[in-house]
């Protein structure tokens, strides 16, 4: 019991009087909680209609991505394919240029690609090819930058893809 102190009459002396009956604390741990990843309407709303990713939903509800993924599968909500890096669409690949919104061959760069392929066929390393291109003063797609072995490798790879199509 907790005593409540009151003033008696105008007297400032404090005495303990019990004004209200003691309160009883009732602990009720039973509550209905459905995790958001187990709620098909929530998952459909966020994933399908709002187009949020699994990672975004998991951050939103404070759950793991795997729990969200299992919830989507459990309620047969089709999982989208992972998005793939599509490069920089604003910059065409080496050997291409954009004219009136369409990608066309850039003849000068096409000749450089042919030269790179010939040097590679002769057994030059990527580093050696990059050095030769720099010495010849051939510019990269990002004008003024030096050629690097990785850039030569990408040009070779993209030219193989272009010829395969």
Image (tube, rainbow, N blue to C red):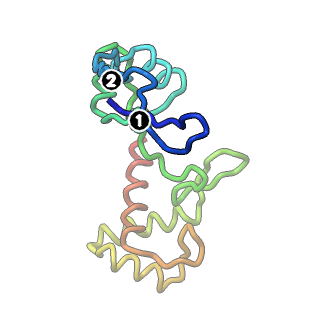
Q: Quadrant of residue 60?
A: top left
- Where 17 sits versus 71, above or below? below
Q: Write down the residue under mark 1.
A: 16
Please tell me whether residue 85 is drawn above or below residue 83 in the rendered image.
Answer: below
Q: Nearer the viewer, residue 86 or 115?
A: 86
Query: Residue 122, how many percent across, how many down?
Result: 29, 72
What residue lies at 51% left-to-right and 35% top-to-bottom?
Answer: 6
Quarter holding the N terminus? top left
Whether residue 91 is situated above or below residue 117 in the rendered picture: above
Disc 2 vs disc 1: which is toward the camera? 1
What is the CA distance from the residue labelled 2 to the residue labelled 1? 22 Å
According to the picture, the residue beneath numbered tag 2 turns out to be 25
- Percent coordinates x, y for residue 160 in the rendering: 38, 52
Instruction: Report the side of 94 relative to 165 (left or right).
Output: right
The local secondary structure at tag 2 comes to loop
Taking depth in this image into account, of 78 and 100 the one nearest to the observer is 78
Q: Secondary structure at mark 1?
A: strand
Give the residue at x 47% y 82%. 134
Q: Nearer the viewer, residue 150 or 109?
A: 150
> What residue is rendered at 60% in x and 73% in y?
143
Name the N-terminal-most of marks 2 and 1: 1
Seen in the image, is 2 located left or right of residue 103?
Answer: left
Residue at horizontal 33%, vertical 77%?
127
């Amino acid at each position: 019991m907790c005593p409540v102190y009151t003033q008696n009459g105008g007297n400032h002396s404090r005495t303990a009087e019990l004004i209200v009956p003691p309160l009883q604390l009732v602990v009720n741990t039973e509550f209905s909680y459905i995790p958001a990843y187990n709620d098909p309407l929530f998952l459909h709303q966020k994933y399908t209609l709002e187009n949020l990713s699994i990672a975004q939903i998991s951050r939103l509800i404070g759950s793991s991505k795997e729990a969200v993924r299992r919830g989507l599968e459990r309620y047969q909500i089709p999982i989208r394919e992972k998005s793939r890096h599509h490069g920089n669409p604003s910059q065409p690949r080496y050997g291409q240029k954009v004219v009136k919104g369409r990608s066309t061959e850039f003849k000068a760069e096409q000749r450089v690609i042919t030269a790179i392929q010939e040097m590679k066929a002769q057994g030059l390393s990527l580093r050696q090819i990059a050095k030769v291109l720099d010495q010849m003063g051939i510019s990269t797609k990002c004008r003024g930058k030096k050629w690097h072995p990785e850039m030569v490798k990408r040009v070779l790879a993209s030219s193989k893809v272009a010829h395969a199509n």
